[in-house]
Image (cartoon, helix red, strand yellow):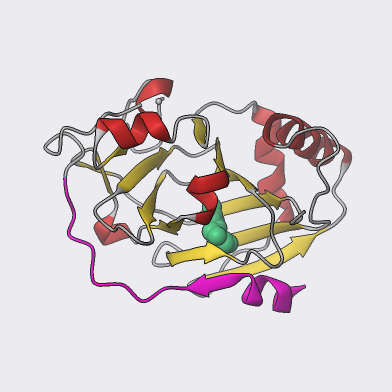
Amino acid sequence: MRLLVTFARRIHKRPLYTPTSCLSSAASCSGAATNSGLQFRDDQLVCGSTGELVQRLRGQVEVSAEIESAARACCGTVDIAIHGYRETERAQWGAVCEGVMDRLRAVAFSEGSPLLGPVHVLDLDKAGYIKPHIDSVKFCGSTIAGLSLLSDSVMRLVREDEPAEWLNLFLPRRSLYILRDQARYKFTHEILKDDESLFSGQRVPRHRRISVICRNLPV
Ligand code: OGA
Ligand code: MN
């Protein structure tokens, strides 16, 4: 399965992104208490190059800040990270985690949508980060749903054919994000490295981060 995950990534070379404050670009921010002390409401967790873009992708990009404590149990299943990142895939979970996965699937995927069997677990070191990429259309379907654990982080979406169009998602630790349709196919996504980790002009310190990612299958 590691191979699948490797192939599932299409890394895009792009000119370096010039950071722009969400607020200074008149972006709309659509929020939560976090380990960095940043406070955003649930409707403030997404901001972007323009308010119009944020509106247009509403429904295709979702972030929910507070997931119930049971999700924390998932962290216990992953070993300590030693490098920039390591990853694994898990088909079977203990009862508590299975319950969390069931809830996640119910929220993110429509009933009967065939899912990629194993769940992908990615363990990013404090210095680790995820480069801009679009998940493989060959292996993965229209929806990507991830639990973001241990550390707050910033996910950036950039439109592949129009880099001026971007969204930043503030992912508090213990949040759930969902990318669908255009947000998943037309925009690259990435997790910013610690020294670039800014949301709405505010620094979001990145620590070790574990994500648990569910995907559906292409139709
Ligand atoms: C990936 C990915 C996002 C995350 O593994 O393809 O984009 O939340 N992960 O870790
Ligand atoms: Mn991805």
- Which residue is depicted at the point 43% across and 59% down? 190
Q: Is residue 112 left or right of residue 18?
A: right
- Up-down relation of residue 110 to residue 31 (above or below): below
Tell me if 202 is positioned left or right of 6 in this view. left
Query: In the visual, does 202 lie left or right of 160?
Result: left
In the rendered view, tell whether residue 70 sits above or below residue 159: above
Query: Which region is colored magenta?
Result: 1-20
Residue 204 appears in view: yes
- In the rendered view, would you say 59 is above or below 138? above
The correct choice, above or below, for 43 with respect to 167 in the image is above
In which quadrant of the rendered view does residue 30 lie?
A: top left
- The residue depicted at 71 percent of the width and 35 percent of the height is 104
Residue occupying image coordinates x 71% and y 40%: 73
Which percent across, then down, holds residue 145? 63, 44
Residue 198 point in image, percent of width and height:
25, 47
Q: Residue at x 88, y 38 (%)?
A: 95
Q: Is residue 66 left or right of residue 27?
A: right
The quadrant of the picture occupied by the N terminus is bottom right
